[in-house]
């Protein structure tokens, strides 16, 4: 079995977050949600590593190696019955 923590490359530094919410709007898989002072990761497992969040994060609070775990994420989504599992 592959450990998910070694596959998904999403990294978030809340100290750099300016709470602009661009990642919330850009993410097609609802990984992020607004918080009081900074954005929160609420569905880390939904991340397909498309990189939309990182591309729209001006202060570079989000880093992701786009596509590294995409195949794993697609298989995982399929196993759990998610019909709309696609990599961006």
Image (cartoon, grey):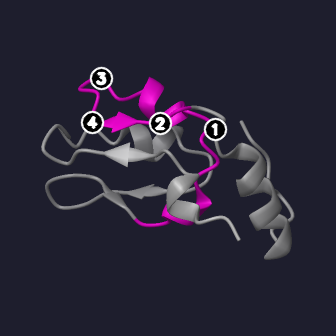
Label 2, label 1: how many angstroms apart (C-alpha)? 9 Å
Secondary structure at badge 2 equals: loop
Position in image of residue 47 (x %, y %): 58, 53
Q: Which residue is mark 2?
A: 64
- Say which quadrant the N terminus sits in: bottom right
Q: Residue at x 47, y 36 (%)?
A: 64
- Residue 45 sits above or below residue 27 on the image: below
Would residue 59 be counted in the magenta stretch?
Answer: yes
Label at residue 58: 3
Nearer the camera: disc 3 or disc 4: 4
Q: Residues within 10 Å of mark 4 (few under 14, many from 20)?
A: some
Secondary structure at badge 3 equals: loop
The answer to which quarter of the image holds residue 72 is bottom right
Q: Residues within 10 Å of mark 2 (few under 14, many from 20)?
A: many
Position in image of residue 60 (x %, y %): 29, 28
Q: Is residue 81 left or right of residue 21?
A: right
Label 2, label 4: how many angstroms apart (C-alpha)? 10 Å
Q: Which residue is mark 4?
A: 61
Q: Residues within 10 Å of mark 1 (few under 14, many from 20)?
A: some
Position in image of residue 74 (x %, y %): 79, 55
Which segment did they paint magenta?
Answer: 42-65
């Amino acid at each position: 079995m592959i450990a998910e923590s070694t596959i998904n490359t999403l990294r978030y530094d809340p100290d750099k977050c300016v709470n602009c919410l661009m990642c919330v709007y850009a993410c097609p898989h609802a990984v992020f949600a607004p918080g009081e002072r900074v954005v929160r990761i609420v569905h880390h497992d939904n991340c397909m590593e498309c990189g939309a969040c990182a591309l729209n994060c001006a202060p570079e609070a989000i880093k992701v190696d786009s596509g590294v775990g995409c195949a794993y994420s697609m298989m995982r989504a399929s196993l759990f019955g998610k019909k709309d599992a696609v990599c961006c």
